[in-house]
Amino acid sequence: MKGHQFVKAVAILPWRRCAIASLLCALSLACTGTVNRQSTLTTASASDTEPNISYGDLIFPQQSDYLMIPVGFYKDEKSSKSLFSKDVYRDSAYDRMSLMTIYNLIFHNRRTGESHLLLSENTLISSFHLINEENEAGEPIKNQFVFIEVIPEDTNQDGNRDRQDAVIGYVANASGKNLQQVTPDNTNLVFWQIDKPLGFLLLKVVQDSNSDRQFTGEDDISFIKVPLGNPGIGSDIITPEMREQINQRVKL
């Protein structure tokens, strides 16, 4: 009987060895597969940190030989998005572009085939608008302009470039040339309006007057007037003499 049991045990032993070997092999393959998948996901996540370049829909300004193409990227909801006048795009195209962060604009002459970029160096374009002058009768005239707001750097050093940083205004003509800065460095553009009949831009900016790298209620406000016929950094409507008088506190 004991001999029979020994023979039976010996007969079973090779099967057990095979089972154990098969189990170890399966575990080894499973571990190898898991490592490969993690490596793939890690690589994909690393590549996602650099968003793919995207191009917006074509923009055809009225009475212009040029068309415009925004250049930028789509990213997560926390990214700074670029804003633009509603009439630039319509319906679903506007909704799609509202998710885009724009850092340059391509201008293309439809007649000559010439193309160029608006900015010599890419930077965050906070918003862009197409504006037209009007004559005194309120009728549109041919002079057209592109007004853009850019955020060149993280002024307050909080790790993000957004509307809390310095926002600088620029104006270019309808061909995307003669780009001119119209608000001073280290200011935050908070409001602008065009006086179409007289051809002026009126802009409200906050100065970092206390040099704390932020734009708050403690800083001075300037109202800047820029002639579109000769754009450049405009003059402050509030003169130094007026500001000195304004800053004299009134006891109530």
Image (tube, grey):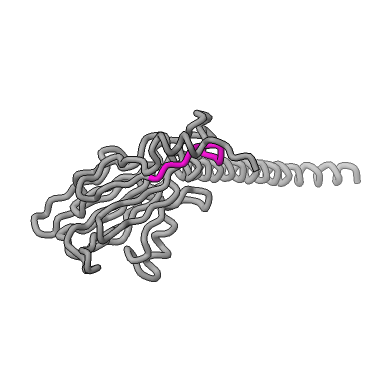
Which of the two residues, 168 or 202, is positioned nearer the viewer here?
202
| Quadrant in the picture for the C terminus | top right
Q: Is residue 191 visible?
A: yes
Going 59% across and 40% down the picture, which residue do you hit? Answer: 250
The question of residue 222 being in magenta is answered with yes
Question: Residue 132: percent from the left, percent from the top?
Answer: 25, 60
Going 17% across and 50% down the picture, which residue do you hit? Answer: 115
Q: Is residue 150 visible?
A: no
The residue positioned farthest toward the right in the image shown = 1
Which of the two residues, 5 or 191, is positioned nearer the viewer here?
191
Which of the two residues, 206 or 45, is positioned nearer the viewer here?
206
Question: Residue 233: percent from the left, percent from the top?
Answer: 30, 39
Question: Residue 142: percent from the left, percent from the top?
Answer: 17, 61
Left/right placement of residue 69 relative to residue 38 reads left
Magenta residues (range): 215-223
The residue positioned farthest toward the bottom in the image shown = 91
The residue positioned farthest toward the top in the image shown = 211
Residue 245 vertical placement versus 57 (above, below): above
Q: What kind of secondary structure does the magenta stretch mostly adopt?
A: loop
* Quarter of the figure with residue 58: bottom left
The question of residue 200 being in magenta is answered with no
Left/right placement of residue 153 relative to residue 111 reads right
Question: Residue 52: percent from the left, percent from the top?
Answer: 38, 48
Going 54% across and 45% down the picture, which residue do you hit? Answer: 37
